[in-house]
Image: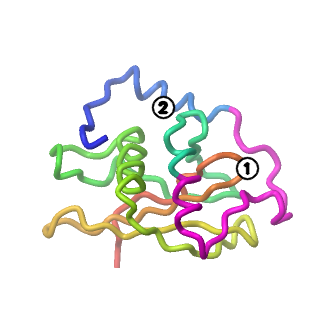
Amino acid sequence: MNNLTSFGSNDTILIHNMQPRGLGNVSNDPSRESPLNPSDWATARTELLRLAQRRECRYFAWTRAIPCDWAPQTVWDPRYEMYFSDQSAWSFIIELLEADRAFTPVPMNTPPATIGYELIESLASNLPQLYIKVQAYRGMILGRSFHNVTK
C-alpha cells in the first residue's frame, strides 16, 4: 500500500458518503467501547488496521459527543508533492499500521473512559510534524486528529 494516487472529485463525493449513518447517541457507558486493551498493542493494531481497511468503518465528523480535528487538506505530503485528502490520510494511517508503527494509547475525555491511539510522524525535515489520533469505537475507527503539530 505504498502507492497512493491522486483522487478526483468523484472520490471526494464517495469519501463524504462514508459517514452518513453517524454514531447515534453516544453513551457514557465504557462497556460499549471497543474492547481494546491499551497495554496490548499487537491486538489493538490488528483491530485498528482491520477497521481502517474497511471504508464503511471509517468516521471523521466533528460532533459535540466525539470532537475531532481532522484536517488532512492542510498537511503537505512531500512524497507526492500535494496535500493529503481524506482518502490519502486513511491510506497513510493504514501504511503506518501495516508497518507496525507503535501508536501511543491515550485516555480520552470524550467519550469518557475510552482510549485513543496517537502518533507524531515526521514527514520531512522542513515540514511540521504530523499529529494523528484514531480510536476504535462501536465497530468503527474514528479519525480524531490528522493535522500539523503546532507549538
Which residue position holds label 2? 15
Q: CA distance from mark 2 to mark 1?
A: 20 Å
Residues packed near mark 1 inside 10 Å, few (<14), some (14 to 19) or many (20 plus): some
Label the magenta part by its dominant secondary structure. loop
Q: Is residue 125 left or right of residue 90?
A: left
Q: Residue at x 34, y 79 (%)?
A: 151
The image position of residue 96, as x and y in percent, is 37, 56
Q: Residue at x 32, y 24 (%)?
A: 8
Q: Secondary structure at mark 2?
A: helix
Q: Is residue 143 left or right of residue 115?
A: left
In the depicted structure, whether residue 105 falls above or below residue 140 = below
Which residue position holds label 1? 138
Residues packed near mark 2 inside 10 Å, few (<14), some (14 to 19) or many (20 plus): some
Q: Which of 14 and 58 lies nearest the eye of the viewer?
A: 58
Q: Earlier in the sequence, mark 2 or mark 1?
A: 2
Q: Residue at x 35, y 70 (%)?
A: 149
Q: Say which amino acid is labelled 1.
A: Arg
Q: Which of 91 and 75 lies nearest the eye of the viewer?
A: 91
On the rendered image, what quadrant is the N terminus found in?
Answer: top left
Q: Which residues are magenta?
A: 21-48
